[in-house]
Amino acid sequence: MIRLIKGDITTIEADAIVNAANTSLLGGGGVDGAIHRAGGPAILEECRKIVARQGGCKTGEAVITTGGLLPAKFVIHTVGPVWNGGHKNEEALLANAYRNSLALAVEHGIRSIAFPNISTGIYHFPKPLAATIAVDTVKQYIPGTGIEEVIFVCFDEENLALYQQLLK
């Protein structure tokens, strides 16, 4: 039910991949930029419609778009928190990002979903804590939802080792 791989999330064959987006939803660096580049203009077009309708995406929330040119049918965009020393509810906001992404997956009949390591890049969330929150939240959420597979896609060896330890 839970798989772990090291690689590029834009190449993953799943019903949906999750984008570690920013609140503007208009693309950026890291995973966000890679997904927008690989998925083509259809993703940005749908993001712009969401922004026009609701003004972006708040931290911890999630929205869904087409996968465009990606192997995944959908992209679930979620905004993880920027790490501020743990004093701004960052742990709860990160758990919400995973939970709200999973809720959208269930709502759209998605059976397989791939997550990047949300908030661990330029948002500087401590990788060990982020991995623990990701694994715990997913394990608590998925039973009985119809989600058959969750794939954690690690971009670097450090995250891969952390997830391997947690998923033993």
Image (cartoon, grey):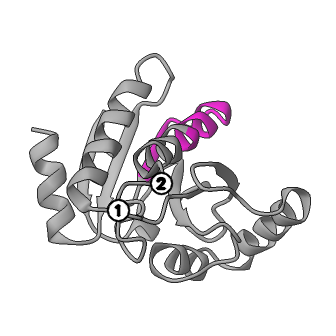
Q: Residues within 10 Å of mark 1 (few under 14, many from 20)?
A: few
In this rendered view, identify the residue nearer to me: 101 or 148. Answer: 101
Residue type at numbered disc 1 = Gly
- The location of residue 13, given as percent across then percent down, is 44, 56
* Horizontal side, residue 102 vs residue 163: left or right: right
Q: Residue at x 67, y 36 (%)?
A: 108
Quarter containing the C terminus: top left
Position above or below: 88 against 49: above
Position above or below: 131 against 96: below
Quarter containing the N terminus: top left
- The location of residue 71, given as percent across then percent down, is 52, 63
Distance of label 2 from label 1 (alpha carbons):
8 Å
Outermost residue toward the front in this view: 87
Q: Write the start and end of the magenta stretch as one range.
A: 100-114
Q: Residue at x 15, y 42 (%)?
A: 166
| Callout 2 touching callout 1 (CB < 8 Å) | yes
Residue identifier under label 2: 88
Residue identifier under label 1: 85
* Horizontal side, residue 3 vs residue 55: left or right: left
- The location of residue 22, given as percent across then percent down, is 60, 69
Q: Dot 2 lies on which element?
A: loop
In this rendered view, identify the residue nearer to me: 167 or 136. Answer: 136
In this rendered view, identify the residue nearer to me: 129 or 75. Answer: 129
